[in-house]
Amino acid sequence: MKETKLTALARRILELADSNRELRRGLARHEEVNRSLEIEGKRSDLLLEESRHLQNRLQEMTRNPCMDEPLRLFYPSKSSLT
C-alpha cells in the first residue's frame, strides 16, 4: 500500500516530537552538568584562597617566628581575616 502524503506527514510529526524530547533531555543534562561545574569551581576557588592564606601565614611565621600564636595559622581570628 502506498503511503499517502498525510500519513507521511503524521509519521514525520511523530519523529520530530521524539527528536524534540531527546533534545530537551540533553539540554536538561547539559544544564545540570553546568551547575555542578559551577559549584565545583566555586569550591575550588575557596580551597585555593584558603591554601594561599595558609601559605602566607607559614611564610610570615618563618620570617618572624613567634611561638605564642601557633593556632592562628590554622584557626585565624575573624578580625585578622578582614
Image: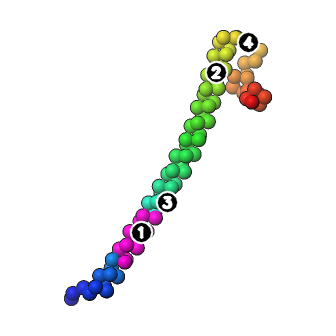
Q: Earlier in the sequence, mark 4 or mark 1?
A: 1
Kind of residue at badge 2: Asn
Q: Quadrant of residue 22?
A: bottom left
Q: Which residue is labeled 1 in the image? A: 20
Which residue is drawn at the image coordinates 61% and 22% (left, top)? Answer: 55
* Placement of the C terminus among the 4 image quadrants: top right
Q: What label does residue 66 carry, if any?
A: 4
- Within 10 angstroms of label 3, few (less than 14), some, or many (20 or more) residues? few
Q: Label 2: which residue?
A: 56
Q: Is residue 11 above or below residue 50?
A: below
Q: Are marks 2 and 1 in contact (CB under 8 Å)?
A: no
Q: Earlier in the sequence, mark 2 or mark 1?
A: 1
Q: Position of residue 58 (x, y in %)?
A: 64, 18
Cβ atoms under marks 1 and 3 closer than 8 Å? no
Q: Amino acid at mark 4?
A: Cys
In this rendering, position of residue 29 left or right of residue 13: right
Residue at (74% x, 13% y) in the render:
67
Disc 4 element? loop
Marks 2/1: CA–CA distance: 53 Å
> Which comes before the other along the chain, label 2 or label 3?
3
Q: Eyeballing the image, is 4 above or below 58?
A: below
**How many residues crowd around disc 4 within 10 Å: few (fewer than 14), some, or many (20 or more)?**
few
Answer with left or right where residue 47 lies relative to residue 68: left
